[in-house]
Amino acid sequence: MSIYGDYIKSVIRTVPDWPEQGVNFRDITPLLQNSAAFRKLIDSFVHRYQEMNLDAIAAIDARGFIIGAPLAYELGCSFVPVRKKGKLPFKTISETYTLEYGHSEVELHSDAFQEGDRILLMDDLIATGGTMLAAANLIQRCGGQVVETATIIDLPELGGSQKIRDAGYSVFAVCSFNEDE
């Protein structure tokens, strides 16, 4: 967890019973609207990764882009979007993953990385871990090496971060929420 983790967590809004009864939605909009909080969020990632010699930040569509792009700028490395199927204009590779209600697919340009590139994979939240694992598989298929997976929020009770660790990837979250918080 980041040194700013408790502060950032306090700025995130919990919306009960959305999008369905019994779900506590973690809304990062207030975090993005608060310039001091947003700076602390990006600084949390900069401080963690500034000496890791990363080649690129790969961020997952779409909220991952919000944190991935400024981090890539601050670290002086490239930014690579991992998109939902059908959103990239060039030759792509894709990976399907399972959701609670079906399947989804993410894509990456086939020339996104060179063999051995050191990649940080980012998204806004880890729930069940399916999207992050699919994106990590794409990066490896393109020759990249996932140095770590990073997120603003971890929901550990949903088991995603453990699945990601079990698959051999390190996980960093700025803050985490339990269901009852």
Image (cartoon, rainbow, N blue to C red):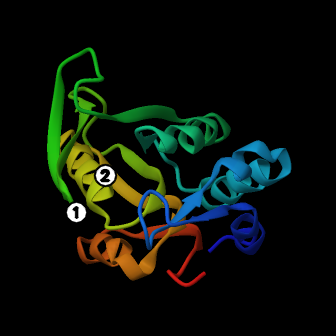
Residue 165, quarter of picture: bottom left
Task: Please state which amino acid type lies under the numbered disc 1.
Answer: Glu
- Classify residue 44 as left or right of residue 130: right
Q: What's the residue at 40%, 33% (across, down)?
A: 81
Residue 80, quarter of picture: top left
Question: Are circles 1 and 2 on residues that touch, CB within 8 Å?
Answer: no
Q: List the residue tagged with mark 2.
A: 145
Foreground disc of the pair 1, 2: 1
Residue 97 x, y percent position in the rendering: 17, 53
Above or below: residue 7 compared with residue 86: below
Q: List the residue tagged with mark 1.
A: 100
Query: In front: 121, or 119?
Result: 121
Q: What's the residue at 22%, 49% (across, down)?
A: 140
Residue 62 x, y percent position in the rendering: 45, 38
Task: Please state which amino acid type lies under the numbered disc 2.
Answer: Gln
Q: Secondary structure at mark 2?
A: strand
Q: Which mark, residue 131?
A: none
Residue 8, quarter of picture: bottom right
How many numbered dots are placed on residues in this image? 2
| Mark 1 or mark 2: whose residue is earlier in sequence | 1
